[in-house]
Image (cartoon, rainbow, N blue to C red):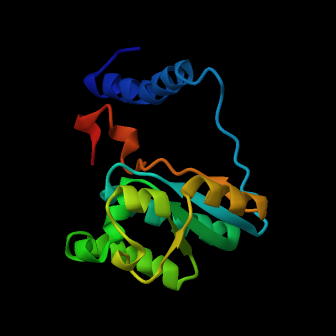
Amino acid sequence: MKYTPKLAALLLFLAIPVSYVAHAEEFAPYGTAKVDMHKIPVINTVFDVNYDDPQKLNVLYNYVKNTKKVTHGKVVVVTHGPELRAFAKENYQKYQGIVDKMAELAKDGVEFKMCNNAMHAAGFNADDMHGFITVVPAGFPEIAYWEHKGYAYINPTPLSVKDIRYIDQPQLKK
């Protein structure tokens, strides 16, 4: 058989998928993930929120929306960290976007509970906070209270998974 440039190119083109599959299998020694898109029963949830930066409440917003959409249950957010300063009326201009998102969640039935101890440690009083906040004696006992009432505990780490696939490969980021 005589190899012409066209035939060589065709053979190379046909060999690429075979080499790609062989190469891909080399990196998949455990096979492929299974899919189990089962129905979730109604579940009430309590979110334990303690973020060093109020901007991370933007990620919380998505977590709460996505959880509520699947669980169809009641949601309580217990805030007891530095993020609580975003809920102070005096900081509304600085954190307006975040506060408006949290107020939207509250309007949709999400209850926001704030630790009195953390609030006072930060130099605030209850009358400094927006009206959709309920100040409670202490954050951890409040979480325990809701768990005792059957609410499932969620501790949402404020890390977005958007573009995580490309985090180690910036040249591939779209």
Query: Between 124 and 107, which is closer to the camera in this rendering?
Result: 124
Is 167 rendered above or below residue 118?
Answer: above
* 137 left or right of 3 in image: right
Q: Is residue 30 visible?
A: yes
On-image quarter of the N terminus: top left
* x then y, percent, for residue 63: 51, 61
Is residue 59 something that shows in the picture?
no
Q: Position of residue 139 (x, y in %)?
A: 55, 57
Which is more toward the observer, 161 or 134? 134
Q: Quadrant of residue 108?
A: bottom right
- Total tally of numbered discs in the picture: 0
Residue 96 position (above or below residue 17): below
Q: Residue at x 34, y 39 (%)?
A: 166
The answer to whether 86 is drawn above or below residue 109 in the figure is above
Q: Residue at x 53, y 65 (%)?
A: 64
Give percent across and percent down for residue 19.
47, 22
Q: Relative to residue 28, is residue 149 depicted above or below? A: below
Q: Position of residue 57 (x, y in %)?
A: 39, 61
Report the residue that reaches farthest toward the top: 1
- Name the one closer to the observer, 161 or 123: 123
Q: Nearer the viewer, residue 22 or 135?
A: 135
At x 37%, y 24%, the residue is: 12
Residue in the picture at 39% in, 51% down? 162
127 left or right, relative to 36: left
